[in-house]
Amino acid sequence: MTELQLKVLQLLKENSKITAKEIASMLDQEVEAIEQLIQDMEADGTIVKYTAIVNWEKVASEQVIAMIDVKVAPKRGQGFDALAERIYRFPEVQSVYLMSGSYDLSVVVEGNNLKQLAEFVSARLSPLEDVVSTTTHFILKKYKENGVILNDKEKDQRLVVSP
């Protein structure tokens, strides 16, 4: 990974709508070179997807999000990967992380209501072979997501007065 690639990735991470022309201007590069760099990183899977961060509190939605800690008994020769893959294939599952600590996997699940999430845990996740236990934490409010403050208060526009 080159320093230029890292700079391009950082700019895209901060604003996925930024154009190749803008990036080229900011990094003092040719537009065609930046376009090719981005296409190459998309092709090799370095750039997986472009998304928007949505403040769902501003949308009339009954969305419920839970983080579920999962303790598992990994199978010999497969480690945690086989079970993680099985879990991330459920459509309700948004993210799966291998963790250190008391639990092995952290699973982020979204649903339309508490009943739907409870049913996911009791009927689909917990009965899986190799799942030893789960602990569910419901997200009550998001303050910051992917480095973005969701309800940023207005910035104070007053000038600082010093003696």
Image (tube, rainbow, N blue to C red):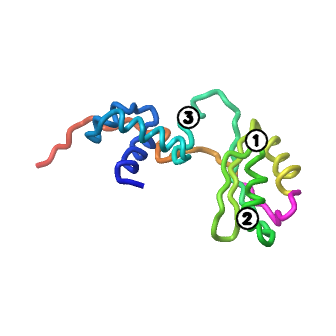
Could you tell me the amino acid type at mark 1? Pro
Kindly check if marks 3 and 2 are in contact, taking CB atoms under 8 A apart as contact: no
The local crowd at label 3, few if under 14, some if 14 to 19, many if 20 or more residues have their Cα within 10 Å, is few
* In-front residue for pair 51/132: 51
Q: Which residue is mark 1?
A: 91
Q: Quadrant of residue 158?
A: top left
Q: What residue lies at 50% left-to-right and 39% top-to-bottom?
A: 150
Residue at image coords 84%, 65%: 130
* Dot 3: element: loop
Left or right, 10 with respect to 65, comes to left
Residue 20 picture quarter = top left
Residue drawn at 56 percent across, 39 percent down: 49
Q: Quadrant of the N terminus?
A: bottom left
| Residue type for callout 2 | Phe
> Dot 2 lies on which element?
loop
Segment colored magenta: 127-137
Percent position of residue 27, x then y: 29, 41
The mark nearer the N terminus, 3 or 1, is: 3
Residue most extreme to the top: 60
Any mark on residue 80, and which?
2
The nearer-to-camera label among 2 and 1 is 2
What residue is shown with label 3?
Answer: 54
